Image (cartoon, helix red, strand yellow):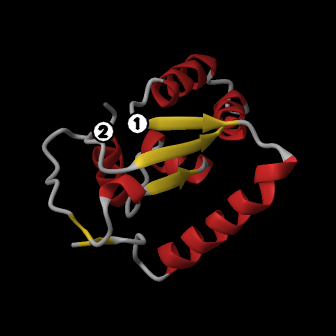
Amino acid sequence: MIVEKNLQKDYELAVPAELLKIGLDTNFFMAIFLQEEGKLDASARVLWMIADGVLTAIVSTITLVEIATLFCQKQELERAKKAIEVVVSMQNTIFVDITTEIALPVANIKVLQHQNHDAGEIPGITE
């Protein structure tokens, strides 16, 4: 895994675990791959919750293309390939194709997540 394995997993759920799903976008993954200060710890906690089966990740196939594109623009083809392999190999993750039936609901979820992120919280999770 890309993040340190000794991070504390001290989270408490405010809703039943089987109800928790989180959409992960390009920015989430790039914060990890680029080790962005200020974003890495929160992202690592989410990854641990996914690995532990506490959260189920939802990732769009478009996100895979965007991740690869960002590395390919820098001529980092091997890094692009490795990043995609890491994402695709994640456990407890559902990959979805974007269709007209799900584009708007996904957009609404992303807006809600960004609003909660801007407020400094992840819905249903407290420290």
In-front residue for pair 90/29: 90
Indicate left or right for 38 with 75 as reference: left
Q: Are marks 2 and 1 in contact (CB under 8 Å)?
A: yes
| Quadrant containing the N terminus in the rendered view | top left
Residue type beneath disc 1:
Asn
Q: Element at badge 2?
A: helix
- The residue carrying mark 2 is 51
Residue sticking out furthest to the right: 100
Quadrant of the rendered image containing residue 125: bottom left
Residue 52 drawn at (x, y percent) = 25, 42
* Circle nearer the N terminus (2, 1): 2
Q: Report x, y in % for residue 110.
A: 63, 64
Residue 72 found in image quarter:
top right
Above or below for 29 versus 109: above
Q: Residue at x 61, y 24 (%)?
A: 76
Which image quarter holds the C terminus? bottom left
Q: Residue drawn 36% across and 71% down?
A: 124
Q: Which residue is mark 1?
A: 92
**Please, what is the three-letter code of the amino acid marked with disc 2?**
Ala
Does 60 sit above or below residue 122? above
Number of residues whose C-alpha sits closer than 10 Å to that of mark 1, classed few (under 14), some (14–19) or many (20 or more): some
Image position, residue 37 (x, y; %): 38, 58
Residue at 63%, 65% in the rendered image: 109
